[in-house]
Image: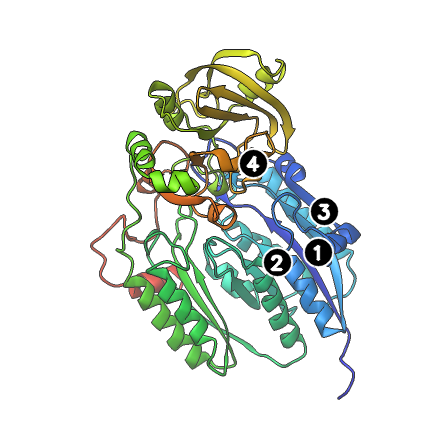
Amino acid sequence: MGRRRPLRIAFGRIFQESNAFSPLATTIDDFRRAHWISDDALLAACGRRGVEIPGYVKRAELSGFLRAAERDGAVEAVPLCSIAALPSGQVAPEAFADLQAELLKRLSTAGPIDGLFLSLHGAMRIAGATEDAEGQLLKAIRARVGAELPIAVCYDLHANFTPAKADLATISCALRTNPHRDMYRVGQRTAELLIARLRSKFRPTRAWRKLPLVLGGGAGIDFLAPMRRIFLMARLFERLPRVRYVSLYMCHPWSDASDLGWAVDVLTDNDQVLAERLAERLAEMIWQVRDVPLPTLYTPREAIEKARAAKWARKAGHVALIDVADVPPAGGTGASTTMLAELIASPPKMTTYIPLCDPQAAVALSALAPGSAVSRAVGGSIDPDRHRPVTIEGRLLGVHDTKFGATVTVACGEVKLVITEKPPMTINPTFFSDVGLDPKRADVVIQKSLFHYRVYWWKTALRHVPFDGAGATSLDHLRGVQLAVPSYPLDQTISDWRAADKRLRKLA
């Protein structure tokens, strides 16, 4: 066998999930504080001994890319930059301009490259803009590198897949687990496809469909019905000889994109007919489960009663009460006081951990000594139209400096309140253990996460009870979105998706 032709492939990330209903803007400082590395530091972070995104994930898409490059043996990985901010409000226009300029500058100084690998979320929104943010970024990249350079993109499965995303990237691959636990694998697979394209072993041929569907499929978890069967079918399609990847995009519903909707994308090796047939079939399977309802949402009081009744779960672990309307990993502020007000008004007589974002209270209480008495109103400052202050009486357990800024723990009887300066992420039990609260001693944990927490809390979270409070991730916001086509479930009279699909894909 002849020696492989050396390849130079640049790689990088621009990543943020935007919530159009959050009162917080995402600024360039939010990116700089959260994750911003480049050049040799990026290579080291994605290497075998590195940590790709410290504090969140050891190996993700870019580590997967680097692994595929190493396995090929003749690929020079050219690091650009990896920049990400936590989910929050829409990105300020000047911040997006800076991000785009940073990536283009690094592309310009990278030297000649054979291909480009990118990790993008797919649900970033620019405040005041109507255009797809990642589509706009890809247009700028194409203007810099030309129309012929192969570009491969990894997307979150909650991306809003658009004509720009489909037309401007050679290869697109979505994550296929929810909660997400396949970032590394998908990054590696996407890189393998890019390398195969560059070595003329693969001719990417795409067919995709866009459904007038913004919410459906039950809880949307890949290993639970009804989505389990659909994700399984996508994997079965890939066993066909010419199918290389099948993506399912469930979209981020807290977006103001007029073309918001679920999508499927089938990538074959030079077989357009097969790609079209499979895309059509998978889209129809999704449409058939559009009316499978979400899990029942309870009131805060009902959720507490459910937890009190789940004695076996509390004895062996704890009950997770999921604050679906205030989820920071989906752009919520973490500032909802709805459940806290209920817990304070009617103490649950169960050891309960609850987070709250209140910058003013976190900074003020940080000046006190542990053990001090606490009597003050908390909450209500970030989003006063939705959240009212709650007066707490308790004792200060600890003062901490965490990645969520100034952080204090306050014991209000059996309710242990963690007040943070920045939106709290309770996905990992370390959120509580880092501030001196033992996750194993909780009867109830108020989760500010829809499903990602299940990956890390699976040993102790034995019952899951969603409740409907108030916040930026309330599904009630969907009623105010102006969509380009009538979409389910906002319009439940739609019987077929095909006419809307053509409009959303901008077909004649």
Q: Around disc 2, counting alpha carbons within 10 Å, would you say few (fewer than 14), some (14 to 19), or many (20 or more)?
A: many
Local secondary structure at mark 4: helix
Assign the N terminus to one quadrant of the image. bottom right
Amino acid type of the residue tagged 4 in the rendering = Phe
Residue 136 position within the rendered picture, expressed as x and y whole percent measured from the top left: 56, 52
Which of the marked residues, 1 or 3, is nearer the chain's N terminus? 3
Give the spatial CA distance, label 1 vs label 4.
24 Å
Q: Does residue 236 lie above or below 176 as drawn? A: below
Residue topped by disc 1: 46
Assign the C terminus to one quadrant of the image. bottom left
Residue 119 position within the rendered picture, expressed as x and y whole percent measured from the top left: 60, 56
Q: Around disc 1, counting alpha carbons within 10 Å, would you say few (fewer than 14), some (14 to 19), or many (20 or more)?
A: many
Which of the marked residues, 1 or 4, is nearer the chain's N terminus? 1
Mark drawn on residue 37: 3
Q: Around disc 3, counting alpha carbons within 10 Å, would you say few (fewer than 14), some (14 to 19), or many (20 or more)?
A: many
Which of label 2 and label 4 is nearer to you? 4
Q: Quadrant of residue 305?
A: top left
Residue topped by disc 2: 61
Amino acid type of the residue tagged 3 in the rendering = Ile
* Residue at the (46%, 30%) spot, across then down: 354
Residue topped by disc 4: 431
Amino acid type of the residue tagged 2 in the rendering = Glu
Give the spatial CA distance, label 1 vs label 3.
11 Å
Q: Nearer the viewer, residue 47 or 30?
A: 47
Q: Nearer the viewer, residue 137 or 356?
A: 356
Residue 502 position within the rendered picture, expressed as x and y whole percent measured from the top left: 35, 65
- On the rendered structure, is 485 left or right of 76? left
Query: In the rendered structure, are the residues bearing label 2 and label 4 in contact, judged by CB atoms less than 8 Å apart?
Result: no
Give the spatial CA distance, label 2 vs label 3.
15 Å
